[in-house]
Image: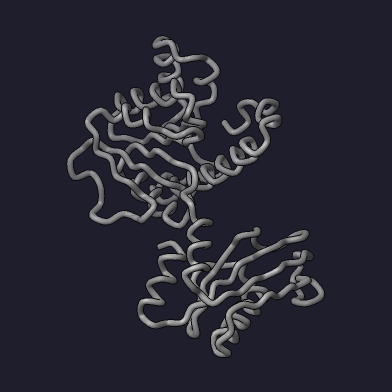
């Protein structure tokens, strides 16, 4: 559940809530500008980085709620003031939750990058759970009846279209694609559709090096451009993890997706860099 929705639920139950946000960062700090958490008299939801900084911010928010205040601004030099080794300076804004405050928070909670995930098997299910707390907007696709679990995280949209590859025609620019279906034939069809679609920034395919070789041969014969084939990520996941347990593959792949997302954001923020780095994110 997003922080704004949690705050509204707490307010509906009569629980006073404060919103704590990192307003400004200079130098090294535990979290980036915009990081937020909710504070009530009993605890917190979300995080601005943990440690003494978060503890101090929570105490200030609870003081504000007890005093009936509306807003406070605190500035911390993490080393001299809090004994934290980060060394930077952080400005923290604390506000009592109100309609204005929550509307601003909702604006900051806009959906992140779209991830098309094909396959609701063991690895797909594990990956969706790992990504539940991330900013990805996941479009989870599987044409098999009853393939999906009864409940899914709030950032997931289910699609059981019979023509699964056609779903990618709707992909917004900068989308990511991850393929792990029950069928190698479907894997190939979706991979082909993804590599031909310029809106798909990166395509990952579960499988071994030998599977990649077979797919490369078939994709090349089907007329897919060589540079797009070369950019295919297969096997998926970060290096150094040998376990083939679904949860291990999911964690490894989630880390790779976060890295891809951050790399793409840098390229999208700098068109000149994008031209120079070319396929760096792949």
174 on left or right of 129: right
Position of residue 195 relative to residue 256, above or below, is: above
Quadrant position of the C terminus in the picture: top right
Give coordinates of residue 263: x percent, y percent: 61, 39
Quadrant position of the N terminus in the picture: bottom left
Give coordinates of residue 205: x percent, y percent: 43, 32
| Foreground of the two, 117 or 264 | 264
| Foreground of the two, 69 or 163 | 69
Extreme residue toward the left, this view: 145
Query: Is any atom of residue 239 visible in this view?
Result: no
Extreme residue toward the right, this view: 80
Residue depicted at 76% across the width and 75% down the height:
83
Residue depicted at 44% across the width and 41% down the height:
114
Residue depicted at 45% across the width and 15% down the height:
224
Query: Is any atom of residue 172 visible in this view?
Result: yes
Residue depicted at 40% across the width and 76% down the height:
10
Give coordinates of residue 260: x percent, y percent: 56, 40
Give coordinates of residue 273: x percent, y percent: 70, 31
Among the 4 quarters of the image, the one containing residue 146:
top left
- The way the protein has been coloured in the rendering is one colour
Q: How many marks?
A: 0
167 on left or right of 86: left
| Foreground of the two, 109 or 233 | 109
Among the 4 quarters of the image, the one containing residue 187:
top left
| Foreground of the two, 74 or 1 | 74
180 on left or right of 52: left
Position of residue 257 relative to residue 53, above or below, is: above
Extreme residue toward the bottom, this view: 67
């Amino acid at each position: 559940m997003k922080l704004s929705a949690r705050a509204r639920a707490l307010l509906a139950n009569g629980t006073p809530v404060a919103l704590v946000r990192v307003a400004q960062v200079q130098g090294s700090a535990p979290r980036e500008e915009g990081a937020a958490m909710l504070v009530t008299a009993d605890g917190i939801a979300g995080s601005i980085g943990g440690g003494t900084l978060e503890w101090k911010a929570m105490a200030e928010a609870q003081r504000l709620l007890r005093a009936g205040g509306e807003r406070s601004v605190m500035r911390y030099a993490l080393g001299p003031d809090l004994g934290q080794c980060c060394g930077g300076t952080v400005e923290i804004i604390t506000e009592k939750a109100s309609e204005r405050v929550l509307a601003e928070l909702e604006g900051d909670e806009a959906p992140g990058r779209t991830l098309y995930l094909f396959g609701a098997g063991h690895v797909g299910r594990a990956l969706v759970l790992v990504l539940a707390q991330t900013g990805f907007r996941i479009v989870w696709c599987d044409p098999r009846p009853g393939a999906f679990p009864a409940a899914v995280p709030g950032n997931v949209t289910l699609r059981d279209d019979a023509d699964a590859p056609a779903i990618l025609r709707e992909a917004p620019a900068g989308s990511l694609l991850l393929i792990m279906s029950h069928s190698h034939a479907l894997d190939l069809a979706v991979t082909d559709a993804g590599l031909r679609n310029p809106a798909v920034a990166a395509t990952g395919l579960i499988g071994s090096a030998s599977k990649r070789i077979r797919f490369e041969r078939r994709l090349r014969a089907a007329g897919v451009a060589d540079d797009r084939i070369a950019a295919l990520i297969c096997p998926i996941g970060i290096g150094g993890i040998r376990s083939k347990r679904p949860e291990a593959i999911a964690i490894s792949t989630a880390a790779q997706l976060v890295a891809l997302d951050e790399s793409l954001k840098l390229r999208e923020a700098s068109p000149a860099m994008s031209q120079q780095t070319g396929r760096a994110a792949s």
